[in-house]
Image (cartoon, helix red, strand yellow):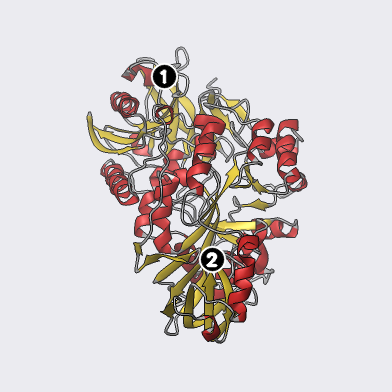
Amino acid sequence: MENTTLKTWPESATNLIAVAAGRAPADTVIRGGKWVNVQSREILENHDIAIADGRFAYCGPDASHCIGEGTKVIEAEGRYIIPGLCDAHMHIESGMLTPAEFARAVIPHGTTSMFTDPHEIANVLGLRGVRLMHDEALLQPINIFTQMPSCAPSAPGLETTGYEITPEDVAEAMTWPGIIGLGEMMNFPGVINADPKMLAEIAATQNAGKTVGGHYASPDLGPAFHAYVAGGPADEHEGVCEADAIARVRQGMRSMMRLGSAWYDVETQITAVTEKGLDPRNFILCTDDSHSGTLVNDGHMNRVVRHAIDCGCEPLIALQMATINTATHFGLERELGSIAPGRRADLILTSDLKTLPIETVIARGVIVAEAGEIKVDCPHLDWPDDARGTVHLGKHLQAADFEIKAPEGANAVKAKVIGVVENQAPTKALTAELDVQDGLVLSDEANDVCQIALVERHRATGEVVNGFVSGFGYKGRMAMASSVAHDSHHMIVVGTSREDMALAANRLGEVGGGITVWQDGRELALVQLPIAGLMSDAPAVEVAAAAQKMVEAMAACGCTVNNAYMQHSLLALVVIPELRISDLGLVDVTKFELTDLFEDNK
């Protein structure tokens, strides 16, 4: 399913040459702007840009020879002409939107290229889900490249997914037109230990001449890190400090620094460039995970670039990190990422490089947004019924399913507790002394310890794994349930009331997935995500409004953590330290092994 709205360079080369030479008229000429050249890192005053066949034909001081009777002339009036922004690593599903609605949300913010890893839907629907995402991506008026997910399950033996991804799946996907590489290789212990399956996936990608994405969520920069790099991943986005960024680029990786809805990892790493003076061409900006509220209210890659500048990065360097650096990394430097002849005509007109107002957005030579308003259609797939009915609980859950039984004869226990860390993906492995009543372990509101449960939702087993979590600050009787639970995407339920936990879980089974918040036996908020239990095909504004009610409901239950929903959705991500929950039990991610809920109480 090729996107035929843009001619390839060979198809348009004759015309591009003729326009540049003045023998044929351009489709569009942008006149009198400040050309921000990310190739040379300079601003060229009073320059013109000529576009033909959706590509740049001429970029220079005077394009009057390219203007014919039918040429559309846009007066830049001294504004900056910058390349369209690229998101180097992100998951569309985290926006709770389909590719079409995600594109509609970010185009007005100046994003014209995205490199997406749909490993969320891969866990639910397997290769078929990836293909559906890939196909809708190719329908869009901007460039959405798909990375074939590498790890479903993310940690074999520690979780059970709806489907598993195999090396054969990876090899098949490498033949699809929109596949740009392999998604983040989260099973870093597998790579470090030369697991044949992981190496086969990496080999299939490299044999296809495509890029292998990395994910090394460990502070260990010793031999284990070096072994991971030797395994082939070309980039890494889990760094949280300057030392992480430096170690990655020294080993030939691109350091991807992320600012998502809940991940604030740019400020702590960009000092490698701003203070240590490392070559900025090996650093890339990305979002990783942005929910719909962030996209609607705060922006997308424009938000990341502004943040990098606020952190002390020179504007032109920050722009390189969100344009040409990304294109070069994925082998697309001749195709996008800069304003230069032959490249796709993706650009932004802005009156200020530091605050970066997105005034006009052009993608493939077409005005796609002006003054924050989208001007083009973003086509949808007809999502099939089997992609919509994916929450299978197997039974009507009761409060008893969320009981945590104490060891025989215990009056109190020392329990392991997942500790949420605000604005970061890692958790802390905590412990808490908890009371026992009638043989059941109690949570501890005074010390911010409530219950967490993982409800199996792929195979209708009816199984529930229970544990404890701290950091949300919940008060009173409440529960929050989500069918978004990276990466296995079972159902995560967090609460202080077992009755409300059962009500919340059953509600998601009823509506086919999403997020719901309950208090004292009544529902405060519901975000319906009917596609794979992960996404809605409603407009981003509608999904963001529902998500805002969810945020307000969480606050009404006592939560003050920034973007706490993102933390909630990652509590089952068994490849990021320190402690997580899966359908198989509690997982110690520092050792990559299952662990008991209670410490030895003898």
Q: Nearer the viewer, mark 2 or mark 1?
A: 2
Q: Residue at x 27, y 33 (%)?
A: 518
Q: Decide: is 552 above or below 245.
A: above
Residue 426 position in % (x across, y down): 54, 44
Residue 68 position in % (x across, y down): 48, 80
Secondary structure at badge 1 equals: loop
Q: What kind of residue is marked 2?
A: Asp
Residue where numbered disc 1 is placed: 411
Q: Mark 1: few, some, or many residues within 10 Å (few <14, many ≥20)? A: some
Residue 104's image quarter? Answer: bottom left
Depth check: give the residue in front, 496 or 378: 378
Residue where numbered disc 2 is placed: 53
Q: Decide: is 189 above or below 273.
A: above
Tell me the CA gap for discs 2 and 1.
75 Å
Quadrant that contains the C terminus: top right
Q: Which mark is on residue 359?
A: none
- The reply to whether residue 403 is visible in this rendering is no
Depth check: give the residue in front, 255 or 320: 320
Q: Residue at x 72, y 31 (%)?
A: 197
- The reply to whether residue 468 is visible in this rendering is yes
Q: Residue at x 55, y 27 (%)?
A: 163
Depth check: give the residue in front, 302 or 525: 302
